[in-house]
Amino acid sequence: MALSLQGLLRRGTQPILGVDVSASNVKLVELVPGGKTGMRLERYAIEPIERGAIVDGNVEKPEAVADALLRAIRRTGTKTRLAAMALPSSAVIAKRITLPAGLHEEDYELQVENEASQYIPFSIDEVNLDFQILGPAAQSDEDVEVLLAASRKEKVEDRVAIAEMAGLKPVVIDVEPFAARTSIDHVTRFLPNQGEGMILAVFDVGQSTTNLTVVLNGQTVFERDQTFGGSQLTQDIVRLYGLTLEEAELKKKSGDLPDNYASELLTPFVEQGATEVARSLQFFFTSTPFTRVDRIFLAGGCAVTAGLAEAVAERTQVPTEIMSPFQGMEVAGGIRERQLRLDAPALMVGCGLAMRRFDV
Ligand SMILES: Nc1ncnc2c1ncn2[C@@H]1O[C@H](COP(=O)(O)OP(=O)(O)OP(=O)(O)O)[C@@H](O)[C@H]1O
Ligand SMILES: [Mg+2]
């Protein structure tokens, strides 16, 4: 289960929207009960955010972000007003600590506050604290391992303000890597033997960053961020063909570009992507005891870039697939399958947030 900040977590089956506010766009996902896995994708939208509205995870222009969220709400026609949102990991300090087993809830709260104050570089009054008991500690039966998360209140308030401006009420504030893990864990259930014993490397290739998460048996064993993403290709298109950023973004997706696009821009970008992936795996091997990866999943908006999955598979010699967080779910009739196939990998975090209504 993921962690929530601010004690906002609400259990139960109330309808909740997953709202992922990233650097380049707002992604909205609504899941409802239904289908074989108990979940049905009812509606989703991806709406671009005005450039410069979010910089390095900081909300610089809340109105512009709220505007994108409003467009997403209108486009989907959803009536749901409760939302699950996420903070970028840069806005959160997460730490595993060990505490005695069998304490009362209030005593854990006190202990967590006490521990947190030792390493948080600002006053405890300025942070939202949350914790989750992970299970018995490895070293001693009398202790439990506790995951503690702290974020600056203002970071949470920024997100809450955006939601409220768009008429939503945030009831869950998650952290992006945890929300991503919710989706990864869902997809893992469809692997042979439910992914047991498999080392899975998930690359989220976004607008400006690529995040690697390596998971084994439900544990994140490695994480790494790189600066590589789709804006590089978009900017190359702008330069080579003299287009605006908006035009370049559209044409990149539609493929409506001159003949030399593949050889001049697309192929070099794909090759660089494969190199970055291979380099990240090398970091994983050299900084952990692990020596292999069994499967690579590509997520994020760039996952569907023509030829990328093939180039990664070839370079790494690891079976590579494009991730759909909606695997095994029923899909509402109004959603076009072809478009969903292109959009799904970018919805890894949004889907993980939407799954919070099922409390998985
Ligand atoms: N169909 C597509 N084909 C190629 N590229 C695409 C497609 N759809 C989206 N992209 C690219 O994916 C990128 C956006 O991906 P995503 O939404 O995952 O990024 P983000 O989460 O906003 O950014 P970051 O993770 O870097 O903060 C953009 O560069 C966009 O051009
Ligand atoms: Mg992203």
Image (cartoon, rainbow, N blue to C red):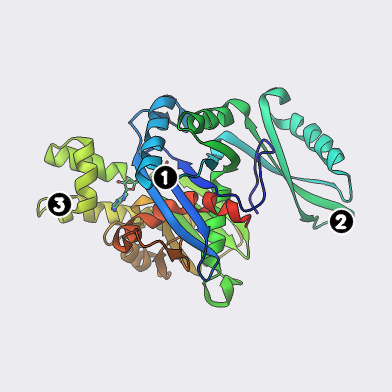
Label 2 beta carbon less than 8 Å to ligand 2: no
Location of residue 135 (image quadrant): bottom right
| Residue located 62% across and 27% down the image | 153
Callout 1 secondary element: strand
| Residue located 23% across and 38% down the image | 246
Instruction: Please indicate whether residue 342 sits to the left or right of residue 281 in the image.
Output: left
Marks 2/3: CA–CA distance? 61 Å
> Which quadrant of the figure shows ligand 2?
top left
Read off the residue under disc 2.
140
* Residue 284 position within the rendered picture, expressed as x and y whole percent measured from the top left: 53, 56
Callout 2 secondary element: loop
Instruction: Please indicate whether residue 254 sits to the left or right of residue 201 in the image.
Output: left
Label 1 beta carbon less than 8 Å to ligand 1: yes
Q: Amino acid at mark 1?
A: Lys
* Depicted 35 relative to depicted 280: above or below: below
- Locate the C terminus by quadrant: bottom right
* Residue 7 position within the rendered picture, expressed as x and y whole percent measured from the top left: 69, 38
Marks 1/2: CA–CA distance? 43 Å
* Residue 260 position within the rendered picture, expressed as x and y whole percent measured from the top left: 11, 53
Asked if one can make out residue 330 in the rendered structure from this viewpoint, the answer is yes
3 or 1: tag closer to the N-terminus = 1
* Residue 128 position within the rendered picture, expressed as x and y whole percent measured from the top left: 67, 32
Q: Are marks 2 and 3 in contact (CB under 8 Å)?
A: no
